[in-house]
Amino acid sequence: MRKKITLFVIEDKIGNYLTEELKYIFENTLEIDYLTPRMSYKPFIHETDLILYTDPSILIEMTQYIKCDAPILMMKRTISRQSIEKLLALDKGKSAYVFNINSFMSNETLADLYSLGIKNIRLFPFYPGFKPIKTVDYIITPNEFEDLPNLDSEIIDIGNRLFEISTVLDIIAYLNVNRKLSEKIIKKYLPLVPTYWKGLKSTLYDKKMLSGQLDVVLNEFDNGVILCDETGLILLANSKASEILEVQKEFVQQDYLEHLIERNPYLKILATNEEIYDEIIDYKQKKLVVNVKKIIYEDVCFGKLISLKFYQDLLSTQQKLHAKLMGKGYYSKYTFSAIQGSHPKIAHVIKICKRIANSSSTVLLTGESGTGKELFAGSIHNYSDRKYKPFIAVNCAALPENLLESELFGYEEGSFTGALKGGKMGVFEKAHKGTLFLDEVGDLPINLQARLLRALQENEIMRIGGDSIIPVDVRIIAASNKNLFEMVQKKIFREDLFYRLNVFQIDLPPLREHKSDIPQLIQYFLKNFNCSRDIDHNFSQFCEKYDWMGNIRELRNTIEYMTHTSSDALKVENLPTHLKKNECLSTGSDEDLENFVMKIIQSRSERGLGTGRRSIYEEFCKKYYVISEKKIRLAINRLSEKKFISVSVGRKGCQINNTHSISMT
C-alpha cells in the first residue's frame, strides 16, 4: 500500500500546490492529503506515515487532531535557481519588499533570499495588514497577488517556492523510499534548486537518516571519496580521502581537481575525462586502486565521483570475502534424509540422485532459485564413496573474474602484486578426491570456461604464474538457474563445456509443482524455528493457490517472518505485505469479502476507531489485499441489507448488530 503524507497548511491554495509538487517529485507514488485551520470539519488523523507543516503556528493549532505516532517535520522551502539568477541581475543598491501571505512566510522568504546570496538589493518584509513605511523599487512575491498592495513599484514574481533539498531527503528517509526511486528523485530535483551540491554535501555529514538512502555516495565511505561538479570543483572529500592523499581535507574541498593534480603529479590519471575502473597507480611509495565514475542523468553530466583505496586494504577485503565464501568448511551437512517432501516428483529426483551418486561423472543441477540445488549437491556427495573427502562449494557469481580464477586454480608466489608468500592452493587442489560444487556456473566468465573445460578433460590444473601441471581427482557438481542451452545458442556459454557438464542433468521441480509437500515443509520449518503454531484454514488455502516463485526458500522466509512478527496462528493477516494477493487469499466470493469486512468493523470498534467506509477500505487493503473502494461499498451495502450491520452517517460509521457478532480468530 502507498505511503501517506498529511500536510498542515494555512489555506487550500497552498495545500493544492504542495500536493501537486510532492506528486511530481515522488512520481505519484505517495498518497497526499492536507488540512487547514479554516476547514469547518477537521477529521482526526489516525493513520499516516508522515506529517509536514508549513509554520509552527499551524502545527500548534492542529496538534489536537493528531491521534497517531507519525513523525512530524517542518517543511523547508526555497527559491528556484532561475528566480535567484533573475534577482542577482538587478541593479545594486535598489530596495524591495518581500511579500507573502503572513508575517512568518514573508520573513522566511526574505531569509531564504539573503542566504542564497541576494545582497545586491535591500529587502524588507511585507504581508497583508502591514502598512508600507517607505517607497521601494520592487515588490518580490512568490506568486501571491490577491492581497498585493497597490504600490508604485515593479512587481517581480519569483514563482511558488520549491521544497528545499534537505526536506526532500528527509521525506525519502522517513518513508524509506527504495534506492532506485531515491536516486532518480535526487538527480531530477537537484538542478532545480540553488542549494544543489551544498545541500547534498551537508546532508552526507549531518543527516544520519539518509544512511540507507544515498547509497550512490555513502556506499563508498569505506574508500576515499572525492566528489566534483561538472567544472572540476571539488565539492566533497571525506576523511578517508584526506588520509590516503596525506592532504588536509580543508585544502581539498572547494579547490579544483586540476590544482590537486598539479600539486600531486602521481594523480595525473584523474585528469582524463573517461571513466576509470580498478586502475592501480603508485602514490608516495604505496599503491592505490582508483575508480572514477561520471554522474549522468538523462545524458547530462553533473560531475564525477572518485574512489580511492589502498591496494593492501583491497587485498584484505578480498581475503575476508574468500573466508566468507569458504565459511561452510570442506564438508556438507546435507543428506537425502533431510530433504522434506513425499511428492512423486521429489521422490523421483532423489531416486535418480542416489543412482548416480557413486559415478565420477559431472552432474548438472538445474532449476529455479530456491529449489534446493546445494542441498541436493551435498546429499549426492554424502551418499557417494567420496563422503569422507572434501566437499567445497564455490559461487561463480560471487567474485570478480581475477579473484575467481585464483580461487579455482590457485597461484604461485610472486605471480602478481599482493600474492601471498608461498602462493596459494586453489579449490581444485583442496577438493582432491572429493567433490567441487560450482554454483551459478552460468555466470562463469567466458575465458575461465576454457580453463575449466581443460581441467575437466585432463584432470589436471596449473596455478596462475606456475609452470607445472598438478593432477587432480575431483567430482564436479554444477548448478544453474539459467537456461544454459539457450546461452550456448547465444554464444555466451561454451558448447563443449556445456556438454562436458551435462552428463547427468537433474531438473529440480519448483515448489508450485509439488504443493502437496507444503504442510510437511511448514512443520519442518516450525520445528527448526523451535516454535509451534496452529495453521488457519485461509492460510492453507493461500499456500495452495500461491505460485511461490521463490520456491522453498520463499516459503521458509515467509514462515520465519510470520513466527517472529506474530504469536498468533499462521494466518493470512500476518503474511508479509507483498504476499497479500487477492487471487490467493480468498475464493473471491461475496461471502469471503463480507466476512473480512465484518472482522475489520468489529476489530476497529473494539479499538475505539472509526468504522467509516474509507477507514474500512484502507485497513482492508493493508490487512488483506488491494481492492477497489467500490467493492467495499457494495459489501457494506449487502451486509446492511442482511441486517448484519447498521450503517450511520458520520464518524460512527458501521456497527455490527449484536446478534451477528463474529469470532476474531
Image (cartoon, grey):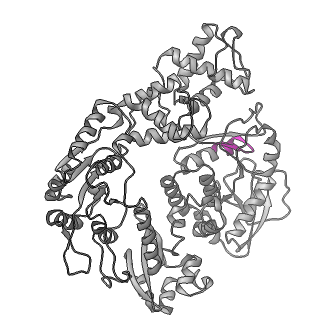
- Let me know if residue 2 is in the magenta part: no
The residue at 83%/65% (across/down) is 134
Front position in the image: 133 or 308? 308
Query: The N terminus lies in which quarter of the figure?
Result: top right
The residue at 43%/26% (across/down) is 583
Please provide percent x and percent y for residue 386: 27, 55
Please provide percent x and percent y for residue 99: 75, 57
Query: The C terminus lies in which quarter of the figure?
Result: top right
The residue at 74%/61% (across/down) is 98
Q: Is residue 625 above or below residue 431?
A: above
- Left/right placement of residue 40 relative to residue 82 reads right
Please provide percent x and percent y for residue 462: 22, 74
- Left/right placement of residue 527 relative to residue 402 reads right
Q: Quadrant of residue 467?
A: bottom left
The residue at 76%/48% (across/down) is 147
Q: Quadrant of residue 427?
A: bottom left
Bounds of the magenta segment: 4-16
